[in-house]
Image (spheres, grey):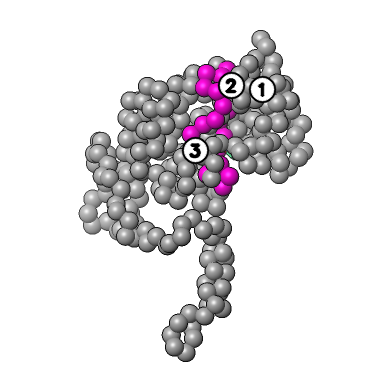
Amino acid sequence: MTANGTFSRQDAMAALAWQLDLGADECIADAPVNRYDAPPPPKLPKMGTGSNIAPLGQSTATQAAPVMAAIEESAAEVAALLAKRATTLDALRNAMATFEHCALKKGARNLVFADGIPGARIMVVGEAPGRDEDLAGKPFVGRAGQFLDRMFDAIGLARDRSQAPIYITNVLPWRPPQNRDPDADEIAMMLPFLTRHIELAAPEMLVLMGNTACKALLGRTGITRMRGTWTQAAGRPALPMFHPAAVLRDPIKKRDCWADLLTLQDRLRA
Ligand code: URA
C-alpha cells in the first residue's frame, strides 16, 4: 500500500498473482460478486428426510454431515420430480435450467445440455463441460471434443451427419471449477436428469466415456477393466470406453480406443 493509503500497481499485481496461485484462471464478470450477499437458494421441499437429522447435543460436525446428506438427497428428489414431469427434450432442458440446487450452476456461464441428433442410434455420455464447452454451451467442442469427432468419423458417424448421427451429452451440465472431477454428490443429484435424458432421446445403445459416466450409470468405476465389454445401463446396451481426453494424454490408449470403436461398429451392423 502507498503512504496515502491507496493501492499501487505493484499491490494489484501481487493480489492478482495470489489469486492465480489459488487457482483462478479466468475473469467471469467485470465486477466482483460477494457470494455471501447472494440470495439463498429456494427452500427444498421436505421429503421424508427428517430421520436423517442428528439429534441436538451432538457436535456441529456430527450434525452437519447428515444434514448435508439430507439436503443432497432431497435435491436429487427435486431433480427426479422435475425430470419426470418433462415429456420432451426441450422441456427437460428448461427443467434443468430452473434447477437451483447444484452449486456448480453458480460458477458456470452456460448450461451444456446436448449436441447431435436426438433419436440417433448412439448416445454418447461424457463427464462434464470444460472451459470451451462452458463458453459455447455445447458438449465436447474443445480438444477432447475434436478428438471425439475424429474417433466417430473413423467409423462413419458424426454429430451432424443425418444418415449416421450420434447424440452427445454429459453426466453434469455445468462446468466444475478448474475442471475438477465431478464429485459423488453432484453425480447423484444430477442423475435423475441424465436418466430422463436417455429415456427421452431413446437411443438404441450408449457409449460411456470414462469413469464418471460409468460411475453415474453403472455405479462403478475401473474403465481400464470395463472398456470394450458390452454391459447394460439405463435399460439398454452400453459400451464403456476410455474418455477421449485420457486417450489424448496417453496415446498408447489409441489402440484400445480403435478396438472399441470397431466393437461398436459391429453392433451397429448386426
Ligand atoms: N469432456 C467431457 O467429458 N465433456 C465435454 O463436454 C468436454 C470434455
Any part of residue 190 in sight: yes
Q: CA distance from mark 1 to mark 3?
A: 22 Å
Q: Is residue 236 left or right of residue 100?
A: right
Front one among 102 and 145: 145
Q: Residues within 10 Å of mark 3 (few under 14, many from 20)?
A: many
Q: Nearer the viewer, residue 134 or 235?
A: 134
At x 55% / y 52%, what residue is drawn? 178
Q: Which mark is residue 157?
A: 1
Comparing 154 with 208, the one in front is 154
Q: Amino acid at mark 3?
A: Val
Q: Quadrant of residue 257?
A: top right
Residue at image location 32% in from the left, 56% down from the top: 38
Residue named by callout 2: 122
Question: How far across and down, in percent of the image, does residue 3 sit?
Answer: 47, 89
Q: Is mark 3 within 8 Å of ligand 1?
A: yes
Q: Which residues are magenta?
A: 112-134
Circles 1 and 2, Cβ within 8 Å, touching? The answer is yes
